[in-house]
Amino acid sequence: MIDLFIATFISLFVIVDPLGSASVFAAITKDISKQDARKIAFKGVVIAIAILMVFAFIGEALLHHMGISLHAFRVAGGTLLFVTAFQMIMGAKGADHFAEGMTSSPQGLQSLAVYPVAIPLLAGPGCMTAVVLHASEAASLSGVTIVALAVLTVQLISLVTMLMSVKIVSFMGHTGSSITARIVGVLLAALSVQFIADGIHGLMNTL
């Protein structure tokens, strides 16, 4: 159970990248009051947790209902994670990327909690994929609960970093944030390749 928690925690931590998310959050809330920013952070985390919990507990059943094997999902999910990792390494998912999108499309404060905070920062396709894959490895309901606990832990860490986003960005600076994002991107790329390899191995065994 401890191994499952650690594996899930590391996967989600690398994908969510709390420090990177803090940089994005600081950028999109720079013209918003601290009180409103806190509300957006809390609501975004709650939405993200709800989404990932659904995928943790019924994601595998949903795949089965759609006739999709876990092996095929591993290949598809690993490919998706690799694309995310590539964008992180190339700097296409930085704070400016999301900030520009928000300034070009006026939305209410409540909408910010859904996009981009909850999706894609905290519970994007990569997180959904990782949660389903790790939950599928759990042999029992208690195992899925361990996955859910890892989800909660990462989301709470993300909440703390968003609430402290201004201080974190000030401390790390643009260069520090960029280096961190690229290192995390390399780790995520390695993780995605492992998902793909496991999926292909499983598909070959079923032939």
Image (cartoon, rainbow, N blue to C red):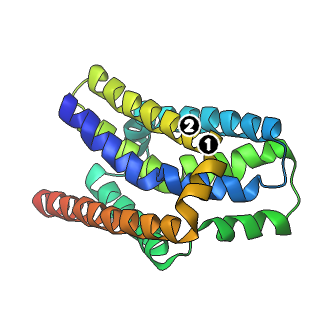
Q: Name the residue under label 1.
A: 164
The mark closer to the camera, 2 or 1, is: 1
Q: Is residue 35 visible?
A: yes
Neighbor class of circle 2 (other Cα within 10 Å; few <14, some 14-19, many 20+) is some
Q: What residue type is labelled 1?
A: Met
Which residue is outermost to the top?
142
Image disc number at residue 160: 2
Q: Is residue 103 above or below residue 136?
A: below
In which quadrant will I find the N terminus? Answer: top left
Which residue is outermost to the left?
205
Residue 3 horizontal/vertical position (percent): 19, 35
- 138 lies left or right of 78: left
Residue 176 horizontal/vertical position (percent): 49, 66
In which quadrant will I find the C terminus? Answer: bottom left
The residue sitting at 63% across, 36% down in the picture is 47
Q: Which of 184 and 104 is in front in this view?
A: 184
The residue sitting at 73% across, 65% down in the picture is 99
